[in-house]
Amino acid sequence: MRDEGDRTTALITIELFEEKAPDHVDNFIRLSDSGAYDHTIFHRIINAFMIQGGDFTNSDGSGGHAAQWYGYCNGETTNSQGEPYTSETCRMEDWTLGDEATNGLKHTPGALAMAKTNAANTGGSQFYIVPSDSTPSHLDDIHTVFGMVIAGLDDVTAISDVSIDDESGESPVHEVRLVSIDIN
């Protein structure tokens, strides 16, 4: 990380695995290219576990959605009457992705994965990165891993070590902001 006076910056390079998680990679690229992630915060940081961001609507872990219609409305393909959801019958803020978690990729240090609720097919825009001092294998085959940090893992780990608000236990005392994502 580089100290710039009132802020510290880090550059993290991630390889995306399109062949293993095509919808998740497509979604991440679309959200990145649209600027949805620009200037968002890492709202949930747990030391020796993960750093989580990507809530571009509420900045607190309660928001965000998929970049486009992938066939799921809050994890469901049909409504309570058994009628199929479409992009017209599902509110955009409820658009989610189908799980691609059984793709052989594991939660090793540096893994980039999609955050979701406990229900299947509920990932949207929130993601997390596993620091170097964590291997949360209990998330394997449940949360979709779709990328890997190839440079800057020390910075991810340093972020996971920031001071946390004692009341929440997961919110950083000082904002940790994602400035931008560039896709090459």
Image: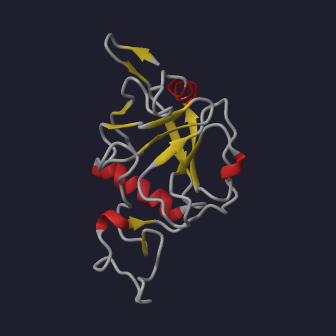
List x then y, in percent, for residue 30.
Answer: 36, 56
Q: Residue at x 60, y 33 (%)?
A: 131
The residue most toward the top is 5
Locate the C terminus by quadrant.
top left
**In this picture, residue 160 sits left or right of residue 72:** right
Residue 158 to residue 25: above or below? above
The image quarter in which residue 173 lies: top left
List x then y, in percent, for residue 24.
Answer: 49, 59
Q: Nearer the viewer, residue 41 or 16?
A: 41
Label tally: 0
Q: Residue at x 51, y 52 (%)?
A: 115
List x then y, in percent, for residue 68.
Answer: 35, 66
Residue 5 to residue 30: above or below? above
The image quarter in which residue 27 lies: bottom left
Q: Residue at x 58, y 64 (%)?
A: 100
List x then y, in percent, for residue 89.
Answer: 30, 80
Q: Residue at x 30, y 47 (%)?
A: 58
**In this picture, residue 157 sits left or right of residue 6:** right
Q: How is the image coloured?
A: secondary structure
